[in-house]
Image (spheres, coloured by chain):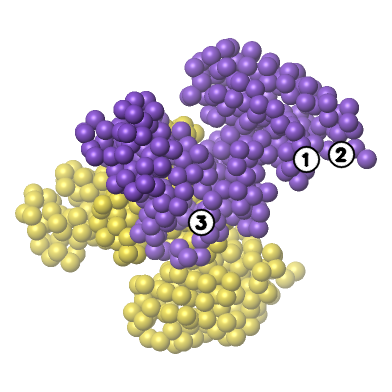
Chain colours: A purple, B yellow
Amino acid sequence: MVKTVFLGIDLGGTNTKVALVDEEGMVLERSIIPTRAVRKAEEVVQDIASEAAKLCKRFEERGFKVQAAGIGIPGLIDWEEGVCLLLPNFPNKWKDVPIRKWLEEELSLPVAVINDVRAITLAEKRFGAGKEVQSLVMVAIGTGIGGGVVLNGDLYIGKDGAAGEFGHLTVEPNGLRCGCGSWGCLEAYSSGPAMVAQALRALVHQSDTLIRDMVENDFSRVSPKIIAEAAQKGDTIAVEIIERAGYYIGQALSCICVVVNPEMIVIGGGVAQAGELLFKSIEQGLRERLFIIPVDTIRLVPAQLGMDAGAIGTATWAKERLEKGVIG
Amino acid sequence: MVKTVFLGIDLGGTNTKVALVDEEGMVLERSIIPTRAVRKAEEVVQDIASEAAKLCKRFEERGFKVQAAGIGIPGLIDWEEGVCLLLPNFPNKWKDVPIRKWLEEELSLPVAVINDVRAITLAEKRFGAGKEVQSLVMVAIGTGIGGGVVLNGDLYIGKDGAAGEFGHLTVEPNGLRCGCGSWGCLEAYSSGPAMVAQALRALVHQSDTLIRDMVENDFSRVSPKIIAEAAQKGDTIAVEIIERAGYYIGQALSCICVVVNPEMIVIGGGVAQAGELLFKSIEQGLRERLFIIPVDTIRLVPAQLGMDAGAIGTATWAKERLEKGVIG
């Protein structure tokens, strides 16, 4: 019997993952290639397509049938057309790149395009932390802050696919300028770079912190991971940075809860690995802000799928779009 | 042929409206009775039921068939059980009042319970401003601030029916205390009482404002309507109060937009009648906060259904719950 698989592509600023994923969300094989995003978009896409084609060929020779491909984009996309509108973290920004068209031509497969964090949210719903609930929101804390919304058992992306842009919830109306153009967005307070900026501020103010020794006075080495390690050693500055970031996330979550009142909140992303202290601060922020809904009835949990979530989510998105007749 | 109708009950702190509504959202007849909320819940419900029964009897004699009843509650409810948990504006709070059970016994009809503002949102979706869109949020600005969420063409109420409690979006993290227990909720800044409180503050500070003469120095007569009239006459204090309230609503809307990315925002409620200035300020707040979604593509519109929206919405909710087999 022919076994059906889907191709999941997780486009990143540094590396891109190409994986074959079965209908149960299992990664059968993965390949990681450097994105080398300084190149033209055409070249990057061609590299990805050729790696994907190799993978598909190997599996088809073994009796698998690759049905469709999904690609997760770290930026703004036109969902209907499958066009990248803006990849803010890519050197040449990928303005108006028709990625679906290019990939469909190269791969001879139906291709579905999705935002990368929305893909992770879908993966967590289908195969991870959210398997058993009908509604959840996921917040992924990394270089940026993004997320996704699952309602009635399905990913809900909204009119422009922007449902889940939680990094741009206002948490301090007169606060720090955000890259988006507004002030006081969550991303300006609780993302990885926001935490690093606070640590650097402490260093230039000559504050007493372990972080200075840990990076051997090389400020460029300060990272969320270093801050988390310093906090674990009891460093007051580091503890404060994480508590503050977590509290703002909790405040933002209280806003999300009065809009969609979900059963579950999933916390993921690299910075979430700061661990218990961040989680406790998130929960504290939520408890101090949310009274209209009993906080104890909301399940606040860590993401489960780890590094493969993006590839699993994009492959699953391709599967679901194909089943709905949106692609193919 | 028997014509199908639904009973819509809009329970208010002062008056309660009982109406028969057809499947196209037309009010065929309405009756308004004083709620006299100082009485026991049993007595209030009995009065409503007896008025409703009279209405139903008259219509059934004329060949109509009343299929189900919906009641809109200005407070917290248990959706599954149809129990009022808390009506904060009622003198005896209606804690744990099994209103569905009581009404079903009195009326011998299936009864669906809904929050009052969620009902209005549903009415605007089916028969009002939102007829032609699949997704919208409604914000109703009155004594409190509430709202509702429509996604994929249906009212989305969330796990506890709290999707739409927009009055409790944090807009000033270190701001005014809110009745809910948190600080800086939208309701503490932009509701009718919040606007009145700001006018009173101006009066006690001896500010130069037309409001003083308009209420003939009787501070208890200050109302959102008076403030709106003063603003229309160019009173600076009144203009500032409305602009500030509107701006915060716009900021809150920007948060709602990144969570559910709706096609349309409907503004309703008594305070919304402050008119053009409030609308302009709401739009300004939204534009200064929301960059990740093009604001021009979001339709910001006033509610259309007016005073009957509650009765239409509760009747329609009853109809839809009956069709889904949730009641009856």
> In the picture, residue A155 is in which quadrant?
top right
Seen in the image, is A211 located left or right of residue A40? left
Tell me, for residue A22, which label it has, or none: 1
Residue A4 placed where, x, y %? 83, 38
Label 1 Cα neighbours within 10 Å, binned few <14 / some 14-19 / many ≥20: many
Question: Do residues under tags 2 and 1 come within 8 Å of each other at their CB atoms?
Answer: yes
Q: Amino acid at mark 2?
A: Lys
User: Image quadrant for the C terminus of chain B?
Assistant: bottom right
Q: Secondary structure at mark 3?
A: strand
User: Image quadrant for the N terminus of chain B?
Assistant: bottom right
Residue B149 placed where, x, y %? 52, 53
- Chain holding disc 3: A
Q: Secondary structure at mark 1?
A: strand
In this rendering, the answer to whether B305 lies above or below B235 is below
Label 3 Cα neighbours within 10 Å, binned few <14 / some 14-19 / many ≥20: some
Give the distance between the C-alpha atoms of the residues marked 2 and 1, in whole angstroms.
Answer: 8 Å
Residue B268 placed where, x, y %? 41, 53
Question: Mark 3 vs mark 2: same chain?
Answer: yes
> In the picture, residue A114 is in which quadrant?
top right
Give the distance between the C-alpha atoms of the residues marked 3 and 2, in whole angstroms.
Answer: 36 Å
Nearest the camera: A108 or B140? A108
Q: Amino acid at mark 1?
A: Asp
Question: Mark 1 vs mark 3: same chain?
Answer: yes
Residue B95 visible, this orientation: yes
| Disc 3 target residue | A300
Give the distance between the C-alpha atoms of the residues marked 1 and 3, in whole angstroms.
Answer: 28 Å
Question: Image point 29% across, 54% down: which residue?
Answer: B184
Question: Image point 9% across, 58% down: which residue?
Answer: B204
Residue furthest toward the left? B206
